[in-house]
């Protein structure tokens, strides 16, 4: 197990290293693929971590992985950071656990400006606090010194020293740090109870006053450099030059900033930023400057989106900055007393987070294709649920009418906005009859795995079939008339523990009534699943959630996930953890 590290003299480090550490947290915090039991800090996980954060830190960032586990954006980000070019391998080699094992995360930077031993203020290093889904594993022999705070929580100090005290003398939990975004919602004007909001997935606090001198100096330098080059800058940005005066006004009139991020339905990301000023006039100046900065940021995003370059990353750059522009357009700025609030929601959050946080070489290696495949599975899962709502049951995997079989994929077309294509399919003829050849050639994109280089209209997503005994039945009725399909309530093992659709590279035309059948009387070999890359395969459970599963998934665990009423005690989040 981890042991407290001995104290060591602290070396002086340049401020840039601390800013880099603050940014690097986004490469280590990732959503856990399933819920976990609450620990000693109770159900309010993010406030609980504040116990280990100094109350006077210049910068604090908290991440609650649990609240984002089903968000497509978080899943896409996790897939990107788990790539070979991402931090997964380094994290596992350094600490003995990976991104899938992280439940909550906290970063505190006591001093963003200066912070050496000869400067005022506590002589504390930047610290990371990580809480894992299960008990901490034994660390690698050559691992860094850390302090174990409890069975599932550790503190790591990048400078190489771990303070001997488990908790700071004055922790952030004792004050109002982050209360603006972590506290309860304010009641409505009529006094009614506020509607419950999605939990905050990411929260951050910045002492703007502490960094104001150095940041204002940087903006002064930028203004001096921009002077003689103004014409060139305007040409580069299509007239959307940075309004440095507005940025300086904003810095001068904001003392503290807190930010909260929530993942919403429809792959959207909601941001709430609350700035505190010295008084009401300062807040009014900050609000006016913020509106100007938003216009500037939108113009610059437009310019970058219009000129993304000629490299292979150009489409991703275009989409990322188009999403930023949409967020700027949706932003609402309001002032109340000494407080300024900015709220906005960004569409296509998967594209935005992957584009901003995953390194370019990693994105080019398949992250975006996996994120798009997750979107396909989500869309198919939603269509199946809409079919169930309309018919009281799911379709059989193979629908048989008048002796002619057709696939569930054909039956689902009206629920995928493909009613016209469904009308063109002749139910009286087999799938490979010339009468249905035109439909076969017109395969909807949702059935093809993004990045699949095959030119044939082969499906990439399959129903999983087994037997008809309680121990071998899956979420599907293998074959029957349209009204013979299985019901949701038949998934007695739990809708979150029963697989319904899987990703597989098989030479099966999409209209062909053929899926994947397994012998569920014995452990299931995962070899037929996946095949599009070396990252395993993705699957949707009956509840519609999408999970990335390793190609080396345990054969007994896979069999348990395929049965709908086998009585096995298995968790999808445990299966999703990579060895």
Image: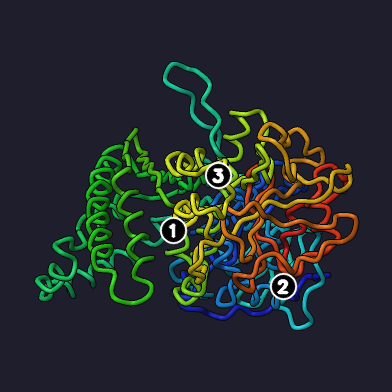
Identified at 76% across, 47% down, the residue is 497
Residue 485 occupies quadrant: top right
Residue 230 occupies quadrant: bottom left
Q: Is residue 167 left or right of residue 293?
A: right
Residue 119 in view: yes
Identified at 57% across, 56% down, the residue is 75
In primary-sequence order, the first of circles 3 and 1 is: 3
Rate crowding at label 3 as few (under 14), some (14 to 19) or many (20 or more) other CA atoms within 10 Å. Answer: many
Specify the farthest residue to the top.
190
Task: Please state, as top left, top right, bottom left or bottom right, where the C terminus lies in the image.
Answer: bottom right
Give the residue at mark 3: 200
In primary-sequence order, the first of circles 2 and 3 is: 2
Q: Nearer the viewer, residue 479 or 438?
A: 438
What label sits on residue 95 in the rendered view? 2
In primary-sequence order, the first of circles 2 and 1 is: 2
Does residue 405 sit above or below 30 in this rendering? above
Q: Are marks 2 and 3 in contact (CB under 8 Å)?
A: no
Give the residue at mark 1: 351
Q: Nearer the viewer, residue 248 or 94?
A: 94
Residue 482 image offset from top left, x and y in percent? 66, 34
* Numbered disc 2: secondary structure: helix
Residue 108 image offset from top left, x and y in percent? 56, 61
């Amino acid at each position: 197990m981890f042991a407290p590290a001995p104290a060591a003299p602290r070396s002086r480090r340049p401020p840039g290293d601390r800013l880099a550490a603050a940014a690097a947290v986004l490469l280590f915090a990732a959503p856990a693929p399933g819920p976990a039991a609450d620990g000693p800090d109770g159900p309010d996980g993010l406030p609980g971590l504040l116990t280990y954060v100094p109350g006077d830190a210049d910068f604090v960032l908290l991440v609650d992985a649990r609240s984002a586990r089903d968000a497509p954006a978080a899943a896409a980000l996790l897939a990107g950071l788990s790539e070979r070019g991402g931090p997964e391998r380094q994290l596992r080699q350094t600490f003995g656990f990976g991104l899938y094992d992280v439940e909550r995360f906290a970063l505190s930077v006591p001093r963003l400006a200066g912070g050496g031993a000869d400067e005022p203020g506590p002589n504390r290093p930047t610290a990371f606090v990580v809480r894992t889904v299960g008990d901490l594993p034994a660390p690698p022999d050559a691992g860094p010194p850390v302090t174990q705070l409890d069975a599932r929580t550790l503190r790591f100090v990048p400078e190489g020293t771990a303070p001997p005290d488990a908790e700071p003398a004055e922790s952030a939990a004792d004050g109002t740090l982050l209360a603006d975004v972590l506290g309860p919602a304010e009641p409505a004007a009529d006094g009614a109870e506020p509607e419950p909001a999605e939990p905050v997935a990411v929260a951050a606090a910045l002492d703007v006053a502490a960094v104001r001198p150095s940041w204002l100096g940087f903006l002064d330098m930028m203004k001096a450099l921009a002077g003689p080059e103004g014409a060139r800058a305007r040409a580069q940005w299509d007239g959307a030059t940075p309004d440095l005066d507005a940025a300086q006004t904003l810095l001068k009139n904001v003392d503290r900033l807190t930010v909260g991020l929530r993942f919403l339905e429809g792959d959207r990301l909601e941001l709430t930023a609350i700035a505190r000023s010295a008084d009401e006039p300062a807040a009014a100046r900050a609000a006016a400057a913020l509106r100007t900065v938003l216009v500037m940021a939108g113009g610059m995003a437009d310019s970058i989106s219009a000129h993304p370059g000629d490299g292979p990353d150009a489409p991703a750059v275009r989409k990322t900055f188009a999403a930023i522009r949409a967020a700027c357009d949706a932003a609402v700025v309001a002032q109340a007393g000494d407080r300024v609030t900015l709220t906005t929601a960004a569409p296509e959050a998967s594209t935005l987070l992957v584009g901003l946080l995953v390194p370019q070489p990693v994105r080019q290696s398949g992250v975006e294709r996996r994120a798009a495949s997750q979107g396909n599975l989500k869309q198919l899962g939603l269509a199946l649920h809409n079919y169930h709502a309309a018919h009281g049951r799911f379709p059989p995997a193979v629908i048989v009418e008048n002796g002619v079989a057709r696939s569930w994929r054909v039956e689902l077309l009206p629920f995928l906005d493909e009613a016209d294509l469904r009308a063109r399919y002749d139910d009286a003829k087999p799938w490979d009859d010339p009468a249905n050849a035109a439909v076969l050639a017109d395969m909807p994109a949702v059935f093809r795995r993004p990045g699949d280089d095959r030119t044939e209209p082969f499906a990439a997503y399959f129903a999983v079939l087994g037997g008809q005994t309680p121990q071998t039945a899956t979420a599907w009725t293998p074959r029957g008339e349209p009204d013979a399909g299985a019901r949701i309530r038949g998934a007695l093992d739990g809708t979150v523990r029963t697989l319904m659709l899987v990703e597989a590279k098989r030479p099966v035309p999409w209209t062909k009534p053929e899926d994947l059948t397994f012998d569920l009387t014995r452990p299931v070999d995962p070899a037929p699943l996946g095949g599009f890359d070396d990252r395993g395969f993705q699957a949707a459970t009956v509840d519609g959630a999408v999970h990335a599963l390793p190609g080396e998934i345990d054969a007994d665990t896979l069999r348990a996930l395929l049965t709908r009423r086998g009585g096995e005690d298995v968790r999808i989040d445990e299966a999703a953890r990579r060895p």
